[in-house]
Amino acid sequence: MGGGANAAGDRAAGDSTAGRTRRDRLATGLLAHVREFLREPVHVVLLVALPPLVVEGYGRAMASFPEFPYMTTVPATLGRVNGAVFAAAFLAGLIGLFQVVSAVQADGRLAVCGFSRAEIFVSRLGTVLAVSVGSAAVTFGALWWRVDVAAPAAAFGALALAALTYGLIGVLVGTVLPRELEGSLVLVFVADFDDFLASGIVDVDSPVVNLLPLHYPHALFRSAVLEGSVPTDDVLAGLAYLAVLFALVLGAYVRVANRGEGA
């Protein structure tokens, strides 16, 4: 009986050690990927400078627009709101793209150090999550400095949802087009077109608009900033969209990893 208790204790200790080792590897992988991102000066400049420039640039550009009947607020404020969503989404998309482009070589080194594919995937995705939320925070601060936000917590959550959505889209773009320049150009076009149609600046009467990645984050962000409300249906739809993208990203990462092993 004593031997059985000792064996059970040894198994529990082994499981605890394995759990700590796994957590340590995930933390090490996450820190390695974040450092890799921050070591590039252009990444830091984008993270700090792009959001306020886009928010203010969109606001000034929209200030000269006439107030159309379907607009719910003054054009300058609407421009800053739309600029905030675009800045957070596009920057997060770049982060996702850069993570995939550098994945094959860097993840190969981590695999040699004993990291499993699951641990590498979680650390990569954790990097996209962390930097996307950071970009949403910088963008939200730039907007809040110029616009009175009715529901700050809900607005930040909607902006983080937009960033995470495009962070995953950036991963998908990087899988199909694993080149930073070409992938960035694709993201600029897609995010700009998406932001424009989902922004409410133009009155588009088409069910296709509901399928755009930024449709629900945009609706949530406008409601939170301008009205202080949080439509539950839009929250659920936005989270469901994010879940579908996550499933696609998981498949895309497996494809990239297999490509790296076959190289």
Image (cartoon, grey):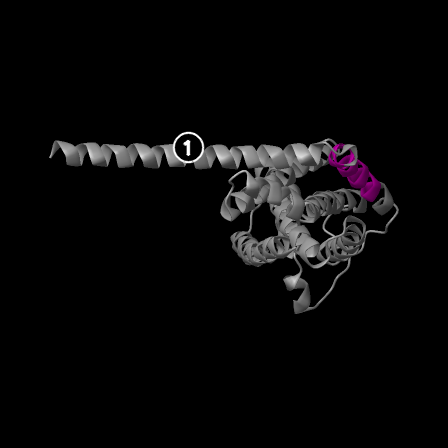
Please state the horizontal and vertical placement of residue 76, each as a whole percent of the image: 80, 43
Crowdedness of circle 1 by 10 Å Cα count: few (<14), some, many (20+)? few
Q: Could you tell me which residue is drawn at 70 percent across and 32 percent down?
A: 38
Please state the horizontal and vertical placement of residue 9, each as a whole percent of the image: 24, 32
Q: What type is the residue that disc 1 sits on?
A: Arg
Q: Main secondary structure of the magenta part?
A: helix
Say if the magenta span includes residue 48: yes
Left or right for 19, reference 1: right
Q: Could you tell me which residue is drawn at 68 percent across and 63 percent down?
A: 209
* Residue at mark 1: 20
Residue 228 in view (yes/no): no
| Identity of the residue furthest to the right in this view | 64
The front one of 245 and 123 is: 123
Residue 32 in view (yes/no): yes
Vertical comparison of 210 with 63: above or below: below
Quadrant of the rendering where the N terminus is positioned: top left
Q: Could you tell me which residue is drawn at 22 percent across and 36 percent down?
A: 8
Say if the magenta span includes residue 257: no
The front one of 173 and 47 is: 173
- Secondary structure under the numbered disc 1 in the rendered image: helix
Quadrant of the rendering where the C terminus is positioned: bottom right
The front one of 185 and 29 is: 29
The magenta segment = 43-59
Vertical comparison of 174 with 109: above or below: below
Please state the horizontal and vertical placement of residue 22, each as a whole percent of the image: 45, 37
The front one of 239 and 129 is: 129
